[in-house]
């Protein structure tokens, strides 16, 4: 018994609004999700990923901020049962076993970062332990705004690529 199309075929088959909603779970920018959804149908995963990357190059900073607003602070584990919350918990699993001092420093660093840059600290946390996340946070606090915005865009794109893979594998 077939459950219907999977992967890119499933995304291609969705009505536009549903495709956009699915893509929003990968990146919280409506502009990005709409651009990728509007580019369908994609012949294969490589074409879809190329379209995703191209859509990132066209985002304004306001679009990036919209996406950032859907990400929790590093160390804050969303309790929701939705897909994004579950993905976020998995991505930040390296914080789960951190000692109290590292957790405290991450919390304080997050607040300092938000005060300095006006948005959450974003890092593709998959595979990183809390110490490495704290090290990156500390390093990035020394960046100027232009450098940090470039890094944030890169990290957001990394997260979206990983989540897109998850979406295609396990809708």
Image (cartoon, grey):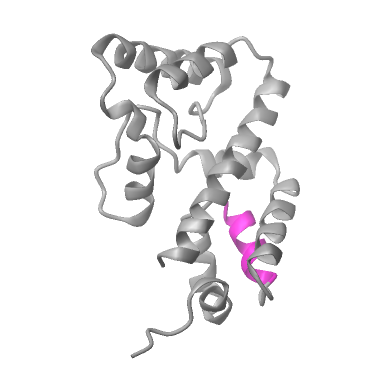
Q: Is residue 31 left or right of residue 93?
A: right
- Is most of the magenta stretch helix, strand or loop? helix
The front one of 114 and 125 is 125
Q: Position of residue 14 (x, y in %)?
A: 52, 79
Q: Position of residue 163 (x, y in %)?
A: 49, 52
Visible residue check, residue 28: no
Q: Who's the residue at 58% across and 40% down the image?
A: 156
The front one of 23 and 98 is 98
Residue 34 position (above or below residue 87) = below
Q: Who's the residue at 45% across and 43% down the image?
A: 70
Q: Who's the residue at 61% across and 41% down the image?
A: 64
Q: Quadrant of the N terminus?
A: bottom left
Visible residue check, residue 81: yes
Residue 64 position (above or below residue 16) = above
Residue 102 position (above or below residue 5) = above
Residue 155 position (above or below residue 114) = below
Q: Who's the residue at 70% across and 52% down the image?
A: 53
Q: Quadrant of the C terminus?
A: bottom left
Residue 169 sits inside the magenta stretch: no
Count of numbered tags:
0
Q: Position of residue 128 (x, y in %)?
A: 44, 29
- Residue segment shown in magenta: 28-39
The front one of 117 and 98 is 98
């Amino acid at each position: 018994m077939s459950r219907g199309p999977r992967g890119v075929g499933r995304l291609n088959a969705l009505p536009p609004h549903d495709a956009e909603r699915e893509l929003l779970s990968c990146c919280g920018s409506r502009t990005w999700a709409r651009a990728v959804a509007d580019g369908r149908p994609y012949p294969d995963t490589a074409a879809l990923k190329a379209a995703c990357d191209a859509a990132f190059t066209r985002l304004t900073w306001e679009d990036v901020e919209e996406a950032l607003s859907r990400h929790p602070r590093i160390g804050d584990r969303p309790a929701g049962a939705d897909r994004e919350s579950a993905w976020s918990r998995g991505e930040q699993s390296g914080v789960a076993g951190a000692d109290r001092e590292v957790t405290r420093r991450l919390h304080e660093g997050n607040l300092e970062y938000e005060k300095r840059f006006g948005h959450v600290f974003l890092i593709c946390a998959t595979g990183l332990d809390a110490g490495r996340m704290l090290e990156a946070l500390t390093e990035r606090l020394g960046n100027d705004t232009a450098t940090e915005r470039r890094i944030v865009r890169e990290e957001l794109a990394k997260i979206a690529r990983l989540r897109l893979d998850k979406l295609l594998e396990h809708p």
